[in-house]
């Protein structure tokens, strides 16, 4: 049986142990920092079968890469898809390439300000799953639902590598009709801290936030972390709201997302595809600098994924790039990351008084306004933007 008292450091909250327990003795409980951990609730029902320990990906990482991986940089040719996506729309295009109106597609979706994994039926319904949300998503009972759906139809699952790993471990065997997509992942933040930041945002604006979008886009790509805040009476775009200040400084990450994350490294990819932002554009594909849209990185980890590339090439602008360029410029793909030294101090303050901790560790946000130069360049043809960028580099 899992050592439930000793899982804190490495437990990713993937919920595989919770999902597999045949006696439903385990529940996922929120700790005081706001992260979910398994707890043995009904000790008397436990039959000591050991399944919870066997399924835990942390005990021994499983490897799924079955080909020589290839890396691509890609951008959807559909403007609406690009606009609703964090980077170049790879997730939506992969769903379109492999799925159809009868495919069960699972990803992270909002319910108010609560984030959880849900399944939707059909590629036409994936919009709520699109775009990055940088907090921990609760997978709830979705693994069991996926197992059920796999008996009848194709399933696509997209999540953090630890979630893909949890799902595969839970399923135990491989399914031809399952396609998995993981992300290059710098970690997830605390949903509880996120909620406290929403309170701070409301207080600052003296208004009520109705909707929060992490990677907003207006007409063109303006900034990687442009947040859209939709209040009761107004909408604001910002790049430094209270939550993002904490998240970027790695002050509110889950403990397992630091140097002990076992999913970094090219051989540890868990999905058929790995998708991410495209980093190092200026060095890897300088001809794309000045583009008005941002691109995705797509790493192909399996034969199944490789067979989809010809379809993706029809619907996306695609460039093959050396995998070494992903390793070099997208550091979370390979390199371990240390959480901030200040993390413990932040949480100590936060647990004492959440509102004053947010006020102490962050500054009020400032609205992000486009300068006259930006407005001018928005209107310019890409070739002029590129020329200007090259001249001023
Ligand atoms: C927590 C997190 C950390 C990331 N870290 C990096 C990084 O360090 N470097 C990098 O290059 N890219 C990172 N990404 C990936 C990047 O932000 C984009 O998600 C990726 O480029 C795909 O964009 P897209 O345009 O193809 O699709 P999108 O439409 O943006 O699709 C995003 C997919 O991610 C899933 N997703 C969103 N939020 C979560 C969540 N909280 N938990 C699990 N799944 C989620 C959605 O279900 C959807 O399927 C991260 C993403 C997340 C969610
Ligand atoms: S040992 Fe078996 S019954 Fe007991 S908690 Fe683990 S999975 Fe459940
Ligand atoms: S199976 Fe997942 S949730 Fe359970 S202990 Fe292991 S890492 Fe944590
Ligand atoms: S950094 Fe590692 S442990 Fe954290 S969410 Fe990403 S894959 Fe999971």
Image (spheres, grey):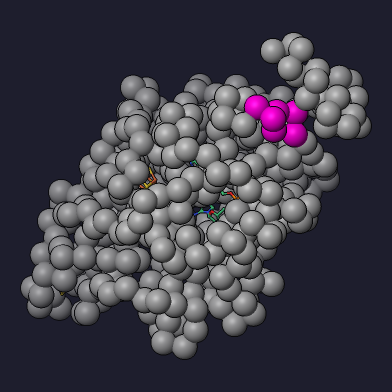
Farthest residue in the bottom direction? 152
> Which residue corresponds to the image point at 86% horizontal and 24% vertical from the top-left?
384
Q: Which residues are magenta?
A: 286-291
Q: Residue 329 versus residue 138: which sits nearer the camera?
A: 329
Q: Is residue 289 magenta?
A: yes
Q: Which image quadrant shows ligand 2? A: bottom left
How far across and down, in percent of the image, does residue 6 sit? 15, 48
- Up-down: is 301 above or below 290? below
Q: Residue 147 versus residue 199: which sits nearer the camera?
A: 147
Q: Is residue 77 left or right of residue 318?
A: right
> Which residue corresponds to the image point at 69% horizontal and 30% vertical from the top-left?
287
How far across and down, in percent of the image, does residue 318 sit? 63, 48
> Which residue corresponds to the image point at 36% horizontal and 76% vertical from the top-left?
175
How far across and down, in percent of the image, does residue 159 sit? 46, 57
Position of the C terminus, as image quadrant, is top right
Position of the N terminus, as image quadrant, is bottom left
How far across and down, in percent of the image, does residue 247 sit? 49, 33
Q: Is residue 203 left or right of residue 351?
A: right
Residue 71 visible in image: yes
- Up-down: is 196 above or below 300? above
Q: How many marks?
A: 0
Farthest residue in the left direction? 48
> Which residue corresponds to the image point at 44% horizontal and 39% vertical from the top-left?
323
């Amino acid at each position: 049986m899992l050592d439930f008292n000793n899982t804190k450091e490495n437990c990713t909250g993937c919920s595989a142990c919770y999902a597999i327990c045949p006696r439903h003795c385990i529940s996922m409980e929120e700790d005081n920092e706001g992260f979910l951990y398994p707890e043995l609730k009904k000790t008397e029902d436990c039959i000591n079968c050991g399944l919870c320990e066997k399924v835990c990906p942390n005990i021994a990482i499983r490897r799924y890469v079955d080909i020589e991986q290839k890396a691509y940089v890609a951008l959807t040719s559909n403007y609406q898809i690009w606009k609703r996506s964090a980077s170049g729309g790879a997730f939506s295009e992969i769903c379109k390439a492999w799925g159809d109106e009868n495919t069960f597609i699972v990803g992270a979706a909002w319910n108010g300000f609560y984030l959880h994994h849900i399944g939707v039926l059909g590629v036409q319904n994936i919009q709520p799953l699109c775009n990055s949300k940088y907090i921990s998503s609760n997978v709830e009972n979705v693994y069991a639902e996926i197992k059920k759906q796999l008996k009848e139809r194709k399933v696509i699952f997209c999540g953090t590598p630890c979630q893909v790993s949890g799902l595969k471990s839970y399923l135990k065997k491989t399914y031809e009709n399952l396609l998995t997509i993981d992300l290059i992942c710098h970690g997830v933040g605390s949903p509880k801290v996120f909620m406290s930041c929403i309170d701070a945002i409301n207080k600052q604006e003296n208004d009520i936030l109705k909707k929060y979008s992490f990677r907003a886009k207006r007409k063109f790509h303006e900034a990687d972390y442009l947040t859209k805040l939709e209040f009761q009476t107004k909408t604001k775009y910002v790049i430094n709201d209270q939550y993002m200040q904490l998240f970027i400084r790695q002050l509110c990450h889950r403990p397992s997302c630091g140097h002990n994350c076992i999913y970094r490294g090219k051989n540890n990819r868990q999905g058929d595809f790995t998708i991410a932002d495209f980093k190092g554009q200026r060095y890897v594909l300088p001809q794309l600098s000045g583009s008005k849209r941002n691109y995705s990185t797509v790493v192909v980890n399996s034969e199944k994924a490789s067979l989809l590339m010809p379809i993706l090439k029809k619907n996306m602008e695609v460039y093959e790039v050396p995998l070494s360029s992903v390793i070099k410029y997208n550091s979370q793909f390979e390199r371990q990351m240390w959480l901030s030294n200040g993390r413990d101090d932040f949480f100590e303050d936060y647990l004492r008084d959440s509102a004053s901790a947010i006020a102490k560790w962050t500054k009020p946000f400032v609205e992000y306004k486009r300068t006259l130069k930006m407005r001018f360049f928005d209107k310019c043809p890409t070739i002029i933007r590129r020329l200007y960028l090259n001249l001023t580099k």
